[in-house]
Amino acid sequence: MAIDRRFLNWGIFFIALGGVPLLVQQGVVSHATAAEAWKLWPLIIVGIGIGILLRRTPAAFAGGLVVAVTFGLVFGGLLASGPDLRGISGCGDPNGNAATVTSQGTGTFPGAGNARIEMDCGVLDVATQPGNTWTFQGLDPQGGAATLTQGRASFDLAAPARSEAFWNAGGTYNRRWQVILPSDPSIDLTVGVDAGSGQLVLANAHLSRLDGRFNAADVHVNLLTAAVPDLRVSVNAGAAHLVLPTTSSVSGTVRVNAGSLDLCVPPSSGVRLRVSGTFASTDFASAGLVHAGDTWTSPNFSSAANRIDLQLDANLASINLNPTGGCQ
């Protein structure tokens, strides 16, 4: 059998690209190991060098094979586990020193309200408390103050302009915000985290809508006892871990681009996940969902009192349903 070398490198690339997620799903390779695949990037330079040295020999194709395998492993690891860019950006270290309180605020929602929180380069902690009062405290090691705009039934919280370059591998910059939301009123909540990390534990919250946008971030959202009828989440070059409600139905859209998503769903809830996109890795079959076309459905969906009905748009992404150990 003759091999057309014009397509050899593409074939090797796709074998490696699909092989890494397959090995992760079979338990041969751990998610942690797959997430470190990007560290193989120097082999791309090595492969180019090999190609130059051997360019007039029968083994000239060897350099291209090294490059193809490396690209396949790097993007396969990204596909299987999602990236972790926090160390590269120098943002969002939970153990970072941010001891200086530079901004704070409080307010009360007289009824239904709106809250918008936009964190950039830092750690965001959001929790809830009974009643109608919200509070905010911002800590910043470089003295930057958050921009807080309050209305009668709203608040808007934005980070100051970043004073360091994004590609600061030293990890020295790290602001931290602590936001407490009231659990009694209905809230339309928008949360953005760019180049950092977030922990949203929204116990007993009543959210008319949750709109989350997470870019180069690792964010954990616990909605176990919350009511969230409308869920909109986008994850770009990062990771999200969503614990969905036990006592209310949820519908909406989740988009994952070059990242990973863990979904934790209560056993009693019916699940329907409609998947679109390219190069997406999922474990829905092993989780017991039935596949028909682009839709994965749990056997109890039609009879369940609470239903999880989501449109998933996944591109170069890994999506795991009820992973071992939970959405940690």
Image (cartoon, rainbow, N blue to C red):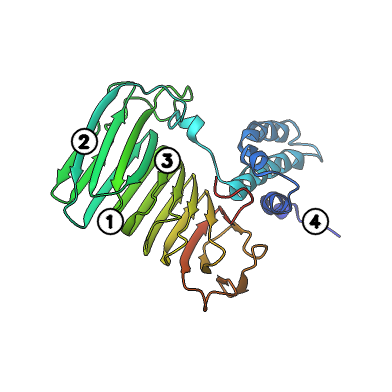
Tell me the kind of residue under disc 1: Asp
Residue, disc 2: 105
Can residue 63 be seen here?
yes
Residue furthest to the right: 1
Q: Which residue is mark 4?
A: 3
Going from N to C along the chain, the mark reached first, 1 or 4, is: 4
The residue under label 2 is which amino acid type?
A: Gly
Q: Amino acid at mark 4?
A: Ile
First in sequence, mark 3 or 1: give its number: 1
Q: Earlier in the sequence, mark 2 or mark 1?
A: 2
SS at mark 3 in the image? strand
Q: Relative to 167, does residue 215 appear above or below in the rendering?
A: below
Q: Which residue is mark 3?
A: 198
Left or right of 112: which side holds 318? right
Q: State the residue position of label 1.
A: 188
Mark 1 → mark 4, Cα distance in angstroms: 58 Å
Choose between 208 and 278: the one closer to the eye. 208
Q: Callout 2: helix, strand or loop?
A: strand
- Between the residue at mark 2 and the residue at mark 1, the CA separation in whole angstroms equals 19 Å
Query: Which element is circle 1 on?
Result: strand
Decide which of 314, 303 is in the foreground and name it.
303
Q: Is residue 268 left or right of residue 114?
A: right
